Amino acid sequence: MKFKILIVLSILFSFLACKKAVDTQIEQIEAPNTLGVSKKSISKLKFVEYALDARTEKMIEDWQEYFQLETVINNVKKADLSFFYDNDKNIKTLLKDLKKNIPEGVNSNATMARITALETYLYKLKSLSNLDTTNQNELLLCIKDFLKSFSNLNFQMNQKIEADNIIIDKP
């Protein structure tokens, strides 16, 4: 009788062990980077994300560096941090050209300040993603700050276009 209970318990434990192995394989597929940050964990980050207004999109349609940066942002949202690994020259070129080729319609001191903040968070994310001692919470917080800075850049460009389109009749 005790032998039958022992066999049933061992079968039950083996099924539970198999379930855990499958769960860890799924997590590894979902989180391709070594720090354990996944698309799911990034999507859970809470912040206000501003999209570009149609007028702003039309104003910046030739600004290629912005769209390259937008591609980087979309990759970060997918937990793909490969852009930040051993890519110093491309990062510096992208940021330099982003500032240099800004369209006149969205060029203002406030927009340049948002680009500078974005640059700061980009370099911070680059350094944290390349460190072995970075934990998942630090990296997620840095990713959140980076995504917020890009959202704030979008918001500021929308505000600039909106302010330029306000017509006030003076008496």
Image (cartoon, rainbow, N blue to C red):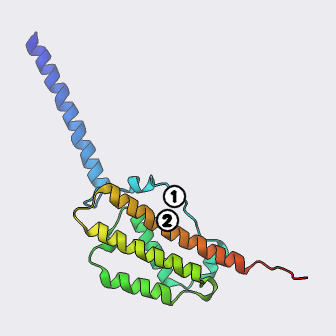
- Residue 145 in sight here: yes
Spot occupied by residue 16 in the image (x, y as percentages of width and height): 22, 32
- The residue shown at (77%, 77%) is 166
Q: How many numbered marks are there?
A: 2
Say what secondary structure mark 1 lies in.
loop
Q: Is residue 78 visible?
A: no
Callout 1: few (<14), some (14-19), or many (20+) C-alpha neighbours within 10 Å?
few
How far is disc 2 from disc 1 in space, using C-alphas?
A: 7 Å
Residue in the image at 16% along x and 26% along y = 11
Task: Write the residue at 48% across / 84% down.
Answer: 98
Q: Quadrant of residue 50?
A: bottom right
Marks 2,1: beta carbons within 8 A = yes
**Image height of 113 relative to 96, above or below:** above
Left or right of 80 in this view: 117 = right
Q: Position of residue 59 (x, y in %)?
A: 63, 82
Rendered-image quadrant of the C terminus: bottom right
Q: Determine whether the residue tagged by mark 2 lies in a helix, strand or loop.
A: helix
Q: Is residue 101 shown above or below 164?
A: below
| Of the image marks 2 and 1, the number of the one nearer the N terminus | 1
| Tag 1 residue | 47
Amino acid tagged 1? Phe
Q: Residue furthest top?
A: 1
| Left or right of 92, for residue 147 | right
Foreground residue, 126 or 57? Answer: 126
From the image, tell me which residue sits under label 2.
148
